[in-house]
Image: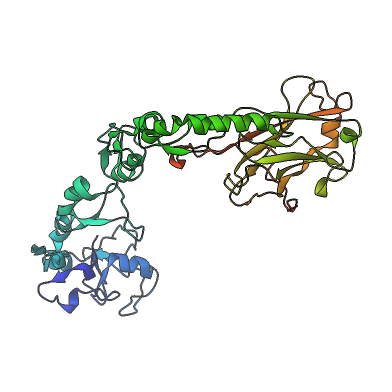
Amino acid sequence: MMSSNEFKFLVEPDEDLKCMICLEVARDPLQHEECGKLFCKQCLEEYGRHKPCPNCRMRKSHYYVDKRGMLLCCQLSDSLTSFCLGKRTIDALRVECSNAKRRCDWQGTVGTVEKHVDTCQFTLVPCPKECKNDKEDTNLFMRKDLDNHLEKDCPNRDYQCGYCGVDGTYDNITKVHDKNCEKKTISCPNHGCLKIMQRCQISKHVADECQYTTVPCKYEIIGCGVQRERQDMAAHEQDSKLHLKMVMDAALESKSDSITLKKGDCMRFSLSGDQALGSAEPFYSPSFYTHPRGYRMTIAVYAKGHGDGEGSYISVFVKLLKGRYDSKVKWPFLGDVTVTLLNQLQDHRHHSLTVKFTDTLMARVGSRYGFSKYISHLNGTVATTVKQYLKDDTLYFRVSVALPSHKPSWLECGIQPQAQGGQPSQGLNYKK
């Protein structure tokens, strides 16, 4: 029920029609038998049924009595009566709509105003889709504007993707789904390429077809590090003199003391005798190049441990060495170096940890990174029924190197394999 203070009377009502408690025109009026004053039913309920009259302070056993001598059946009191004449007078008072400030020009009586407000086109109603405003409150609209809001403006209105037909809310489809819709047509991201296709076709187009994609030379395996747009690479690859020289350099390199890993290759080495059983001095693997014309490095193994792992762990570190091609490769070194201790009982259950060389490490010649707690002596030297790393006083290691992809970063899936065993040990990197 609307309260009297919500009404805007066209003619100021008589004071005798006002509640003696709230001082507004009485709603559901009740009249005191002794003093004749009017009260709102709700005001008297809140005031208390056993208290004296708020006006005359009189109190009797039958304080509020029906004019006909019948007790009034209501929650407030057995001696309160509806003041019928006062109620009819109040209901007949002329008022304007409470939405007059929103330009509703309706005028009527107190008795009919609530029915009008329930259907008034200027009444504020909440959005049924529960869309929120900037303060995270539910938006309110005049009833006459609600249909237009739901059809054109509501961020939670029903909406369908025009490319794939997926249903959802307008906000979700246009702000979230649209960025990932596989059926949406988009332009090739390569500068200069004007082709437009569905998003699901872009990756294959860029990787295998687009003439503006930067690709490595097919002679990368022998050390050619040139990268050019696909449309220009054919001319470079026809430079046989340049690539022949690289082949000759690779042949000379293969005769040097350092091993050169090619794509997919790995390097193996072993520790025997005292080196495997607990020498305090580090064992250094044969040096190797990460790829043809690449970075030179070695693996340092402390059988008795080093730093935090001394005495109870085998420690393993990757150390960058001065190489023949240091002036031609990019620094710092970036890539993953995985060191695996081989299980000599079967070809699985090997123990692998990976050192991830990132921009933050700033790895250069002389730096070393790795794990002071690579594997505990208990796990590394005690055989079980399924694994045995130390056999015939010998440990076998395998090293592999994964270099960064030449694909644009946006083509990568964004999920990189995590190094088993956590991050490289802190405080164990130094310059020679």
Q: Position of residue 8 (x, y in %)?
A: 15, 70
Asked if residue 23 lies left or right of residue 381, the reply is: left
Q: Residue at x 71, y 30 (%)?
A: 255
Q: Residue furthest bottom?
A: 56
Choose top left, top right, bottom left or bottom right for residue 12: bottom left
Q: Is residue 353 left or right of residue 67?
A: right
Q: Is residue 398 left or right of residue 47?
A: right
**Residue 32 percent location from the top left of the image:** 27, 72
Picture layout, residue 232 above or below residue 118 = above
Coloration mode: rainbow
Q: Is residue 15 above or below residue 337?
A: below
Question: Residue at the spot x=13%, y=71% of the render?
Answer: 9
Q: Out of 122 and 181, give the one closest to the viewer.
A: 181
Q: Position of residue 275 (x, y in %)?
A: 88, 35
Q: Residue at x 85, y 38 (%)?
A: 303
Task: Tell me the quarter of the image containing the N terminus.
Answer: bottom left
Q: Is residue 80 visible?
A: no
Residue 341 picture location, percent across and down: 76, 31
Q: Based on the displayed image, in which of its 4 quarters is residue 236 positioned?
A: top left
* As drawn, 47 above or below 134: below
The image quarter in which residue 24 lies:
bottom left
- Looking at the rendered structure, the number of numbered marks drawn on it comes to 0
**Residue 41 visible to the viewer:** yes
Depth check, front residue: 363 or 74: 363
Q: Is residue 124 left or right of residue 334?
A: left
Observer-nearest residue: 134 or 124? 134
